[in-house]
Image (spheres, coloured by chain):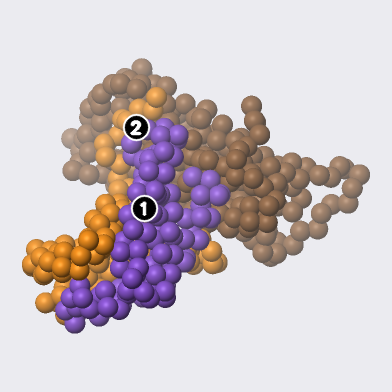
Amino acid sequence: MNVSLYVWQRATAAVMAPMILAHVVVIFYATRHGVTAADILARTCGNIGWGAFYALFVVAASIHAAIGMRNIVAEWSPLDDRGAGIAALIVGFVLLGLGLRAVAAVTLP
Amino acid sequence: MIARTARRPGHRTDLLWLAALLHRLSGLGLVVFLPVHFLTLGLALHSEARLESFLRWSDAPAVKVGEAVLMFFLAIHAFGGVRLLIMENLTWHEGQKRNAMLAALVATAVAIVFVVWVAC
Amino acid sequence: MTLQLKVSLWRGAETGRYQVFSIPQRENQTVLDVVTYVQRHLDPSLSYRFACRVGVCGSCAMTVNGRPRWTCRTHVSKVVRNGGLKIGPLENLPVIKDLATDMTRFFEKWRDARGAFIPTKTRHDETEAITPDSPARRAANAAIECINCGVCHAACDTVRWNESYLGPAALNRAWTLVNDVRDGGHRERLEAVAANGGCHTCHSHQSCQEYCPLALNPTASIAGLKRRTAQAWLKGEISARGRESTA
């Protein structure tokens, strides 16, 4: 972990803090009101606002999680620094790929 | 090589060490959960009906408990993270143990409220 | 018939075992007294390190019932458990023999963190006027009393998990110099602690603060380093890549 990874991790955390609050509020609301798939998709389909919000959320989460996983792998597994870096990249790209696919799934018309 | 001569180190019952462990484990839990979450939402790519049938499956009580656990993980990781951001960027204040306890309490409350008031 | 205290002492080096001794328990007894008694009266082959016996040199730190402490300032009555004590060498350092560790790596980290003062003036220059209550001096003074006993380094799990981590003592020392306006090595020092294994590796467990016998707070010092290095890096003043060789 160096200053560059640190700044990226803390910055993505700061970006996500208010987004998590918004997301939790949305989840509470949706679960309480028993929304169906149709309800969700009716609100999100074609909605640029939702799309942008969650796309940014996914990008930030992917970066943040990748750096966090790098630390865990470096400290708790036998892999060396290079191995930890590779593991981090894999985690990051998997989350980014699946996440953006999911955002596309619910927002693209 | 460094010897491991002592028993399990005594500091592993210290509150702030446990807070850091919980922060790490909750982060790990979220990393494991997120792909599942994304794949579920991606079901909508196939059809609304598939997403709907999954949502109904997730009405089951066992799943609700799992969701409460995830809600706890998200809340504790976020609050713990905010505590770190404050500690690292503002003037140092004593009371880190108190802040860590507060974060854990609020996160637990969030999870309980979720499972009791929202999900049932 | 005096009460007896059961004492387990680590014997060996990387591998070894705990050897049990029975020693007379006294009303006022430090852990160092206990170790000394064993070496003088029961087993002269026991190896351990001490010097001042009064808590100013930092030589006698050991692991006592799972926690790193100065043995000269730890009363047996405060730490005894089930009528016994378990004493081992400090964690996170190679063991030379029995209770004595090899402190080389600990001091190498001090060097690697650039924990040495780089002078900028000669005797012909005017002395720098530093007021004791300037914010920088207060920050330095809060951290400067470290006697390099190794307790914080032994208590830190991040040191345990990460061979390249400079550790709380070295980084705490670097922080005192970062706040010293007379010092001429600021950029190199910030780069040294901004690189892999530097201050950003700290996870703020705060075990260092918890166990420091002088109640210093390396976590706070490291937080200060995180702020300074982040600012310097964002301004382009330092790179994240690496330290120059200090060997």
Instruction: Find chain A in the image and tell me its colour.
Output: purple
Furthest-front residue in view?
Answer: A109
What residue is disc 2 on? Answer: A78
Query: Where residue C4 sits in the image (x, y, percent)?
Result: 21, 35
| Three-letter code, disc 1 | Gly
What residue is disc 1 on? Answer: A97
Q: Quadrant of residue B61?
A: bottom left
Up the image or down, C95 lies above or below C182; here it is: above
Q: Is residue C21 left or right of residue C126?
A: left
| Three-letter code, disc 2 | Pro
Tag 2: Cα neighbours inside 10 Å, few (<14), some, or many (≥20)?
few
Q: Nearer the viewer, residue B32 or C3?
A: B32
Q: Is residue B106 left or right of residue B56?
A: right
Up the image or down, C23 lies above or below C145; here it is: above
Cα distance, mark 2 to mark 1? 27 Å
Quadrant in which the N terminus of chain B appears: top left
Residue sitting at x 47%, y 65%: A14
Q: Secondary structure at mark 1?
A: helix
Residue sitting at x 22%, y 38%: C84
